[in-house]
Amino acid sequence: MMATTARFLAFVALVSAALAGEAAGQSLRLGYEAYAGGLHVMSFGIRIEETGGDYQVATDVRTRGLADFLVGMHLDSHAFGKVRHGDFVPSRYLSQARFGRRSSSLLVEPAQDGGFFVQATPPRESDERRTPVPTASLSGAVDPLTAMLRASRTVATSGTCRQRVPVFDGRRRYDLVFADEGVHPLAATRYSSYAGPARLCRVRQERIGGFLAEEDGEDIGQESLLWIASPLSDGPPVPVRVEVDTGWGGLTIHLDEVTSESGTVRLARRPGVD
């Protein structure tokens, strides 16, 4: 059960971060709904603020419907930091999770020596076996949400998704590797009314250390497809659809609502209505 929980939370962290991409540079609120096999299984809420040289990203992820009855997952994450010379420099990452009747919290703060201060509640189980995290790999790594702000800034300035971003989430050290698949037409679905050109970005999680030993060879949440477009006429490009092969089934996440300084657009459609 603990291995399954850890894999699922790692997957949620990756997708939450991916959804936060492309939002840097202004206040933005995003709402997403996730479906698996036609069932509504999860909701994502994201708030991004960048003011006065400071940034903050907050995500709220929770299961819905039958998935909530069976799993009962709720994950809140927050990233704080400074914007310096166009780069995002993290100062604190907080994560609180509830999985069924179990709850946990995680605090991660960068240290002056290039490492991190990590406080986990409850503490890591003494018999928990994880792959080692090379000390040298921590230098330059950032939390998952800051990583995606950095990635989005790169897309905005270079016009391509292609890049590699080092991430440390308090336990796991991995790189997010982005590949650019170009711009393609995206059709509306029974879940979202968005239709139009979208840039397709392929995101892969390259594991370095800190993963449970028994899951190290598995592909849970390692790759996702991001379709990036601008549903607001004067707003920033954001992921309008995310497709993930979780290893236990496909998950498709649709943009439900986006609010920025340009206004609000609602894209949700009732399932079954064409």
Image (spheres, grey):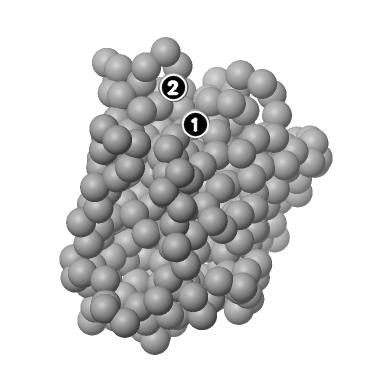
Q: Which residue is mark 2?
A: 87
Expressed as whole percent of the image width and height from the top left, the position of residue 201 reads 69, 43
Residue located 36% across and 21% down the image = 83
Q: Is residue 271 above or below residue 58?
A: below
Q: Is residue 45 visible?
A: no
Quarter that holds the N terminus: bottom left
Q: Secondary structure at mark 1?
A: helix
Q: Secondary structure at mark 2?
A: strand
Residue located 28% across and 65% down the image = 97
Residue 150 circle label: 1
Question: Do the residues under discs 2 and 1 have CB atoms within 8 angstroms?
Answer: yes
Q: Is residue 235 above or below residue 33?
A: above
Residue located 38% across and 52% down the image = 169
Give residue 78's quadrant in the image.
Answer: top left
Residue located 34% across and 36% down the image = 114
- State the residue in front, 52 or 41: 52
Q: Is residue 98 above or below residue 184?
A: below
Count of numbered badges drawn on the protein: 2
- State the residue in front, 153 or 235: 153
Expressed as whole percent of the image width and height from the top left, the position of residue 272 reads 64, 69
Give residue 90's quadrant in the image.
Answer: top left
**Dot 2, how many residues are within 10 Å of its Cα: few (below 14), some (14-19), or many (20+)?**
few
Quarter that holds the C terminus: bottom right
| Residue sitting at the far top | 85
The three-letter amino acid code for the residue at tag 2 is: Asp
Disc with the residue nearer the chain's start (2 vs 1) = 2
Give residue 158's quadrant in the image.
Answer: top right
Expressed as whole percent of the image width and height from the top left, the position of residue 140 reads 44, 35
The three-letter amino acid code for the residue at tag 1 is: Arg
Q: Is residue 85 above or below residue 10?
A: above
